[in-house]
Image: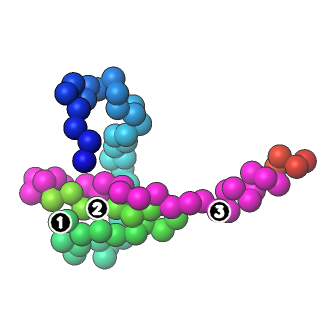
Amino acid sequence: MMCRKDPISAKNLNPRSLEILPSCKLEPSLSSVKPGSRCQFERMGYFYLDPVAAKEGRRVFNRIVTLKDEWARIEMKKALKK
């Protein structure tokens, strides 16, 4: 673990690290997921159901791992060759 003497300030954070999508629709099966569980959202990545937000009655899924988009990479290569 690396410790720093200076506190991490907002200027050091990625401005896109918090992205709130309030109008998302979830599959009915996600209503039974327990807080602290991990789920894979198809073609998006792995997400963690935030237990703090769940106590407030909200379903907040935090992305913990993104998935490689191999198809997009292949399409990008094709486009560059043209």
- Where is residue 63 shown, x and y percent of the image? 36, 55
* The label number, if any, that marks residue 48 in the structure image: 2
| Residue 31 seen in the figure | no
Secondary element at tag 1:
loop
* The label number, if any, that marks residue 35 in the structure image: 1
- Left or right, 29 with respect to 40, comes to left
Q: Are marks 1 and 3 in contact (CB under 8 Å)?
A: no
- Where is residue 49 shown, x and y percent of the image? 24, 62
Give neighbour class at mark 3: few <14, some 14-19, many 20+ (Cα, 10 Å): few
- Which residue shows up at 82% across the image and 54% down it? 78
- Where is residue 43 shown, x and y percent of the image? 52, 64
Residue type pointed to by label 1: Pro
- Which residue shows up at 46% across the image and 57% down it? 66
Point out the stretch of residues depicted in magenta: 52-78
Residue 39 vs residue 12, the one in the foreground: 12
Give neighbour class at mark 2: few <14, some 14-19, many 20+ (Cα, 10 Å): some
Q: Distance between the residues labelled 2 and 3?
A: 23 Å
Please name the residue that numbered disc 3 is placed on.
70
Residue type pointed to by label 3: Glu
The answer to whether 37 is drawn above or below residue 19 in the figure is below
- Which residue shows up at 67% across the image and 56% down it? 72
